[in-house]
Amino acid sequence: MDTSFLLLEDGTVFTAVGFGLPAPLLGREAPMAEVVFNTSMCGYQEIVTDPSYHGQMVVMTYPHIGNYGCEASFEEHLDLPNPISCTALIVHSVYTGPLPPKRVSLHDYLLTHKVVGLSGVDTRALTIHIRNKGAQKAIIFRTEGKSLSRSEHEHALSLVRDYPSVSEIDLIEGVSTKQVIKDPWEGAPKEASLRFAVVDFGIKRSIITELYRRGVAVTLFPPTVDSYDILHSGCNAMLLSNGPGDPERLQDAVSMTRQVIGAGLPVFGICLGHQLITWALGGTTKKMKYGHHGGNHPVVDTQSGTCFVTSQNHSYASEIETLPPSATVWFKNANDNSIEGLFCTDKRVSCVQFHPEASPGPHDATWIFDSFILAAKEARA
């Protein structure tokens, strides 16, 4: 396989061996995106098919990736044309050995879906660099030789520095529905106890599955939906999904959410949905240094004092000093004390920054769905 290069916007270069789709020669066709690291030990297929990674390159900190292959049932997207949302996957060592029946290798999976992979990277050094310097833009490319000349380095650096930041790109487009869909995935309950209006900003399939398991039917709405359509949909509650990018860009969705909250319909949120609710309540969000990405993030329930492990994938966080008195901090991150959840009892609002559906990750937080459903039933009564 050809020698490839990963160049960060601060000029740092990592040499690698390509897998999946070969990296293109240096030029404007070379993939560029923000690079973040994920601390999960497995679940690589769920990670690369999570629409929240749209516009990002993912570095896996666990050294050996791909050992159990890939199959369609592991995917997290909801019928997107290209199931892989991340721009590239970066690993220390990609597995190339035998696989269980009917599974394909990670190399073939990325190649089929035209996504670049890099192996042979010193992912420990790269992760430490991101932790110290913060998440930053990067470019992946090949050259005619096996080393990088000064002029090639300068050219690549100019390309990546000219590339827009995550906060300047509409990343929701292409990973969300454009139409209203009733029960958008298989397994919908035949006799539903509730129906949720779910606004799709890049929803993971497992969120819908968790609702179905609890007898909740789903009507999926596009991210451009207005409050009138939500409030006249006959649904018992609104759930704002996860998704990629900067929540501050989505002020139309913030306004819609504020109107639905004001009308008294229960409103819940997961990940990006939590951030949009923060804005709708009058708060703001901030870009984190390198975000939370992985399946081992400890969270403390401020009401019970219980600590549990969660799956997370976000680069923005709520700013506590901007929240109104009506918003109660529900969860805090045990590592950095950042806000991991909010609730407003008087406004029938609750939301979490982490992923209660996991996929991949621990299932400690699946009870959050039960909490959402109980709140919706109490409001209906």
Image (cartoon, helix red, strand yellow):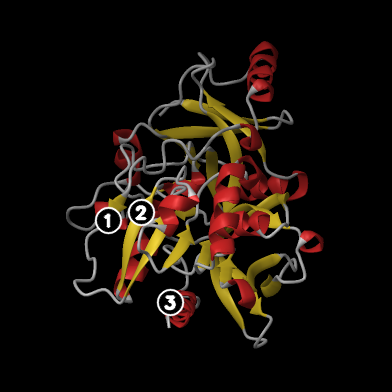
Q: From the image, tell me which residue sits under label 2.
A: 220
Q: Residues within 10 Å of mark 1 (few under 14, many from 20)?
A: some
Residue 327: x, y in percent?
Answer: 70, 70
Please say if the residues under marks 2 and 3 sit with CB atoms less than 8 Å apart. no
Of labels 3 and 1, earlier in sequence is 1
Q: Quadrant of residue 346?
A: bottom right
Please say if the residues under marks 1 and 2 sit with CB atoms less than 8 Å apart. yes
Q: Nearer the viewer, residue 301 or 88?
A: 301
Residue 176: x, y in percent?
Answer: 41, 43
Q: Residues within 10 Å of mark 2 (few under 14, many from 20)?
A: many
Examine the rendered structure and indicate whether residue 228 appears above or below residue 263. above
Residue that appears at 31% across and 42% down? 109
Q: Nearer the viewer, residue 100 or 210?
A: 210
Q: Residues within 10 Å of mark 3 (few under 14, many from 20)?
A: many
Helix, strand or loop status at disc 3: helix
Helix, strand or loop status at disc 1: strand
Q: Is residue 321 left or right of residue 186?
A: right
Helix, strand or loop status at disc 2: strand
Q: Amino acid at mark 2?
A: Leu
Q: From the image, tell me which residue sits under label 1.
A: 182
Q: From the image, tell me which residue sits under label 3.
A: 373
Q: Residue furthest bottom?
A: 304
Residue 102: x, y in percent?
Answer: 17, 53
Q: Amino acid at mark 3?
A: Ile
